[in-house]
Image: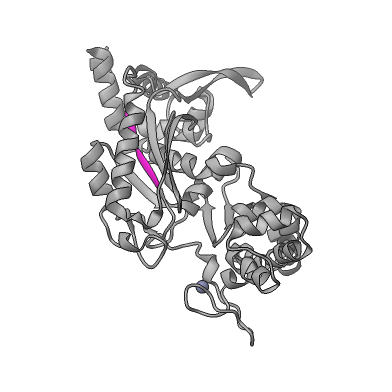
Amino acid sequence: MRGHLTTAGAGPVLSLILSRQAASRPALERVSGLSRATIAQRLAVLFEAGLIVEAEATLPSGGRPARTMALNTGFGTVLAADIGESVIRMALTDLAPRVLDQVLVAMDVASGPAAILEAISRGCRDLLARRADWTAPVLGLGLTLPAPVDYDLGRVVGPSVMRAWDDFDIRGVLRRELAIDVFADNDVNLMTLAEHRLMWPDRDDLHFIKAGTGIGSGMIMGGRIYRGARGASGDIGHIQFDAPTAPLCRCGKRGCLEARAAGWAIARDLREAGFEARDARDVMALFDAGVPEAIQGVRGAGRVLGQVAADVVSVLNPAVIVVGGTLARAGEHLLAGIREHVYQRCLPLAVRDLEIVASRMGSDAGILGAAQLVIDEQLKPGTVEGLIEKALEKRAA
Ligand SMILES: [Zn+2]
C-alpha cells in the first residue's frame, strides 16, 4: 500500500478542503481542474494519513447528494499560550481548534522574557504529561504577545509593555526547551484570525478592532491575515487627528485615536470628573453601574472610532467590522457612533452589505487564534507533506 501513495499534490487538495472552497469529490474536481482519478489518489493519501474524514453531512451537487470531506480534528494537538499583562494562559487544543485542557499562571508581563518563557515551557510540559497516553502528534506551539511582533523573526520590536523583550529570540528559546515548532504573533492579529475562522469563515474581508485599555486592529484580506511588510499593519490606535486641544498619548505624540477613545483615555476623563478609574475594566464597571459620565465616555469613544473605521472602510472595503475588547461589552452604546460615521462618510457601494457587530468570542479569542496560527502554518502546502509522510510511516509500522 505504502509504495503506491505519493504525497505530491496532497497539500493543495487539503487546502481546498480546509478553506471550504471545495468539500466534495465533484467540487474538488471542478475547483482544482484535476481529473477524478487524480483527486481520488490525493484523497486516498489524506485518508490513509488520517488527516481528513468523511463528514456526515451531505451537500447538494447537481441534484445528487455528495459525501463531504473535513479535517480530522483529532489528527493532532496544538499547544497555545496567551501572554496577558498579568496572567499567562496555556492550553492544549485539537485542530478545530477547541480547548481540551489548560493551565493558568499569574505572572506580570514585566517579569521579563527568561522567567515568562520558563513558565510557558513548564506549563506546556505539564499539559503534555497529563495527556501522556495520547499518540496524536503535537503540531507546535502558538504564542500570543501583547506587543508589536515582527512575524518573520517572531520577535517583539519597539516600545511596549514588553520592554525587555525587544529583539529577544522567543522562538529559539522555546524550540530548544520543548523541541517543537513555535509561531508567535501579536494578540490583535490572532484575535482577528480566530474571529475570521471560527465566527465568519465565509467572509473573506474582515476588519477587527480591539477596543480595550488600548486600541489595535487586525485585517483579513482575501481570506488571509494581512500583516503588511513587517507585521505592523492595523496599528490604528496611533492614527492622529489634528485639533487645537489634542490630548497627549501614551506613545508621546498628540491627538492619537487612543488618547481620545481608548479605555485608558476614558478612565483619564472619568478621573478628572472625580471617579476612580485606571483602565477599560474600571470604565466598564462604572458603565455597568449606570454612571452617566461613563456611558457618555463610551459613546464618545464610539464616535471617534467611527472616524477611523470610516477611513479603513474607504481603503479596504471589508465585508464585516467586528469590534472586540473590553469596551465592546457596551454593545450598541459603542457601535452606534461607529455605524453613524461609517455610513455617513463611505461610498454606498462600500457599505451596501457591510456588517458592524460586537465580537461574540469572549476571552478565548487569543488562545484559539494562537492555535489556529499553528494549524494554518503546519497544514499549508509545502509543509503538510512532512506531516503526511510521518503519519503514513507510523501507520505502516
Ligand atoms: Zn499614540
- Left or right, residue 105 beside residue 256: left
State the residue in front, 378 or 119: 119
Q: Position of residue 318 (x, y in %)?
A: 61, 55
What residue is shown at x 68% (from left), y 66% (from top)? 275
Q: Main secondary structure of the magenta part?
A: strand
- Quarter-wise, where is residue 125 in the image? top left
Quarter-of-image position of residue 126: top left
- Residue pictured at 47% horizontal, 73% vertical: 251
Number of marks: 0
Q: Quadrant of the N terminus?
A: top left
Q: Is residue 272 left or right of residue 256?
A: right
Q: Quadrant of the C terminus?
A: top left
| Residue in the image at 49% along x and 18% along y | 54
Residue 15 in sight: yes
Q: Is residue 159 above or below residue 34?
A: below
Residue 390 percent location from the top left of the image: 26, 24
x then y, percent, for residue 394: 25, 17
Q: Is residue 355 visible?
A: no
Left or right of 356, for residue 186: left
**Can residue 139 be found in the magenta stretch?**
yes
Q: In the figure, 288 relative to 337: above or below? A: above
Q: Farthest residue to the bottom: give it.
A: 244
Color scheme of the displayed model = one colour
Q: Nearer the viewer, residue 28 or 167?
A: 167
Q: Is residue 151 left or right of residue 264?
A: left
Provide the residue span drawn in magenta: 138-143
Q: Position of residue 214 (x, y in %)?
A: 54, 62
Does 305 appear in magenta?
no
